[in-house]
């Protein structure tokens, strides 16, 4: 029986692990992967003390920091179900085993929202990708498209200019929706990038691999076929919260509703931190802070348990 089981090893989960180790809790971190969505960021310029670093490098620093403590991390593990026992503790059923804990901190973050147009499923992994950091080098000297309107889309487009000969940035809005105006200006000044506004994907065509992306103007309904070898999808994400459906209350976005002071969900003993919760802003540094705060609140809860 663990004092605490942390689900997720992104900024929130790893930060939580450091605080759990320092408080000498008997705890375990389980996650399908290390790093979360932040690992895919091409450039992080707003993490305090690290003016410029890529997501992968930042996650490596997080992981190395955590390893300095006595921390048990099981990666490659998927959580299937969480059940509450009669004594108030929890049973966590994973892809490998069943675990028990007095408390659970869910920091599983979010999952990429997938494209839903003809050809999207057929060409997944055959030209359609959701990770620029992983796959950008594959498209060296090729023409690619990025589907996305926020900072993630801008970041991906800029990253791809280091490899591709041309990058189409398909934005369903009439103007950019990113918060990072410096990044937006860099994109506008880059001659490799062509921004296609007010348009959305309609169909993906190809043979064995992607050969073109058909986009449709939302207002005029006119279509245009872009000859591309790769399509990078950055259309947002959804909270990975299905494991607590029926236990903790979720908002309309599927995020776990928490008490902002304690990080406790509506189910006593289940806490949440980072992008999976209903906190207002989804930022790496905020997720890390929330993970630390959540663990401190877990400690206070356990003292009364």
Image (cartoon, rainbow, N blue to C red):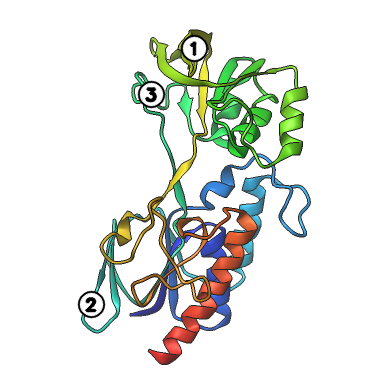
CA gap between label 1 and label 2 equals 57 Å
Count up the numbered dots: 3
* Callouts 3 and 2 close, C-beta under 8 Å: no
CA gap between label 3 and label 2 equals 42 Å
Q: Which residue is drawn at 66% across and 31% down?
A: 159
On screen, residue 167 versus residue 240, left or right, reads right
Q: Mark 1 points at which residue?
A: 220
Q: Within the image, what quadrant is residue 91 found in?
A: bottom left
Residue 96 percent location from the top left of the image: 29, 59
Residue 3 percent location from the top left of the image: 40, 80
Foreground disc of the pair 3, 1: 1
Mark 2: few/some/many CA within 10 Å (<14, 14-19, 20+): few
CA gap between label 3 and label 1 equals 23 Å
Q: Mark 3 points at which residue?
A: 120
Q: Residue at x 66, y 58 (%)?
A: 61
Counting residues from the start of the chain, the first of labels 3 and 1 encountered is 3
Residue 85's disc is 2
């Amino acid at each position: 029986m663990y004092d605490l089981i942390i689900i997720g090893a992104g900024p929130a989960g790893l930060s939580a692990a450091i605080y759990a180790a320092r408080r000498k809790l008997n705890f375990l971190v389980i996650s399908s992967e290390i790093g979360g969505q932040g690992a895919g960021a091409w450039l992080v310029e707003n993490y305090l003390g690290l003016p410029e670093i890529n997501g992968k490098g930042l996650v490596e620093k997080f992981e190395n920091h955590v390893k300095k403590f006595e921390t048990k991390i099981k990666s490659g593990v998927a959580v299937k179900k969480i059940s509450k026992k009669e004594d108030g503790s929890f049973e966590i059923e994973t892809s490998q085993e069943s675990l028990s804990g007095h408390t659970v901190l869910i920091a599983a973050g979010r999952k990429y929202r997938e494209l839903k147009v003809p050809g999207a499923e057929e060409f997944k992994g055959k030209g359609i990708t959701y990770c620029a950091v992983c796959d950008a080098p594959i498209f060296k000297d090729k023409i690619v498209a990025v589907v996305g309107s926020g900072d993630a889309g801008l970041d991906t487009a800029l990253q791809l200019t280091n490899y591709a000969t041309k990058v189409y940035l398909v934005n369903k809005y009439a103007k950019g929706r990113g918060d990072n105006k410096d990044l937006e200006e860099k994109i506008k000044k880059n001659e490799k990038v062509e921004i296609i506004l007010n348009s959305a994907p309609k169909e993906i065509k190809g043979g064995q691999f992607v050969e073109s992306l058909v986009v449709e103007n939302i207002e005029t309904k006119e279509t245009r076929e872009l000859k591309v070898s790769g399509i990078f999808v950055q259309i947002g994400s959804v909270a990975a919260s299905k494991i607590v459906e029926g236990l903790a209350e979720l908002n309309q976005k599927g995020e776990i509703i928490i008490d902002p002071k304690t990080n406790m969900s509506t189910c006593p003993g289940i806490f949440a931190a980072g992008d999976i919760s209903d906190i207002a802003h989804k930022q790496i540094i905020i997720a890390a802070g929330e993970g630390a705060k959540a663990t401190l609140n877990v400690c206070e809860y356990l003292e009364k348990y």
